[in-house]
Every structure is written in C-alpha cells, then in structure tokens.
Image (cartoon, rainbow, N blue to C red):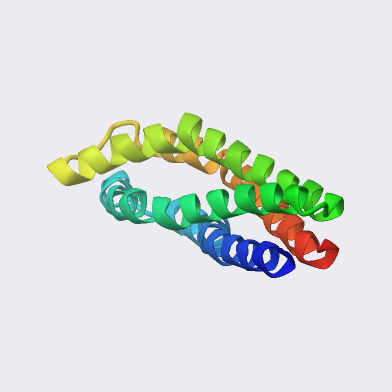
Amino acid sequence: MHAVVQALAVVSILANAVIYGTDVFCAIVQRPAIANVSDQVLTSVMGQVHRYGDRRMPVPGAIGAVAALLTAVTSAVSGRAGAAIAAAVATIALFAWLAVYAKVSAPVNKQLTAAATQGTTLDNARALQRTWDSVINLRVALQLIALLALCCTLIAV
C-alpha cells in the first residue's frame, strides 16, 4: 500500500505542477505583459489563450485533484494518518482553487474567448483582465499549498 500512496502522490504532484507552473507564469509574466498592450490585442490574445487553455488544462487539473483525493483515501485506509492529513490538505486546496477558477476566472475566460472567436474587441476587456488578475496570486498560493502538502505526504508515508 506504501507504493500505491507514493505513486498516487507523485501523479498528483506532476499533474498539479502543470497548473501551478502555468499560474506562476501568468502571475509573473503574462499579467505585466498584457498590461502594456491595447484592448484589441488583450481581447484577441487572452481570448485565444483561454480558448486553448480551457480545453486542455482540465485534463492535468482533474488528474491532479483525483490523484490527491485517492492519495488521501489510500493513506487513511492504510493507517498512515500523517500522509492522509497532508493529502487531505492538498485536496482541499485543489478544490478551493477550482472554486476560485469557476467563480472568477472561467466567466472572464468565456467572455474573452467569445470576443476573440468573433474577432471583436470588448469595451470592458481591461476590467475583465483586472478581475482575472485579481485572483491569480490566490490561485498560485492554493496550488503551492497543494504541492507542498503532497510533498509532505511523500515524507509521511
């Protein structure tokens, strides 16, 4: 059971590292870069980024969250309380991340994607981007908590 817990934790770490790395990139590179472009470019570029991101990023996100949950359950069943608690913290952080994404980021993504697909520029593109940017540091922090907790899981097994 020890090896199963470790394997699940590693799968979750690798999958969530994709999301974490993307969010960190957005926080430290994309946010300041997009602040220096026109509303037309912002709408077009961010709409296209979200068009592809919203299609492709759910795969590693789902794998990471499910693997974290399975890590917590498997750890608990095998009597590894420390590992179970750490994996549960990771799972909670990941579901909190998902709630923030669904409540704030996804609606912005949808509007920017629709405009980019139609070739239009949104009058509120800058405000939408500020809304999206307002939660990126929280998203990074939640992913970091999850990854650190999953690493603790490996130590506690």
- The picture places residue 104, in percent across and down from the top left corner, at 49, 32
Q: How many marks?
A: 0
- The picture places residue 93, in percent across and down from the top left corner, at 67, 43
- The picture places residue 53, in percent across and down from the top left corner, at 36, 54
Q: Residue at x 17, y 45 (%)?
A: 117
* Quadrant location, the N terminus: bottom right
Q: Residue at x 30, y 40 (%)?
A: 112
Left or right: 108 as drawn, with respect to 29: left
Of 56 and 118, which appears nearest the observer? 56
Residue 43 in which image quadrant: top left
Q: Residue at x 42, y 54 (%)?
A: 34
Of 122 and 97, which appears nearest the observer? 97
Image position of 3 with respect to 94: above or below: below
Left or right: 14 as drawn, with respect to 104: right
Q: Residue at x 52, y 57 (%)?
A: 19
Of 1 and 155, which appears nearest the observer? 1
Most distant residue in the left direction? 118
Of 56 and 29, which appears nearest the observer? 56
Left or right: 120 as drawn, with respect to 26: left
Image position of 98 with respect to 72: above or below: above
* Quadrant location, the C terminus: bottom right
- The picture places residue 156, in percent across and down from the top left corner, at 84, 62
Image position of 112 with respect to 9: above or below: above
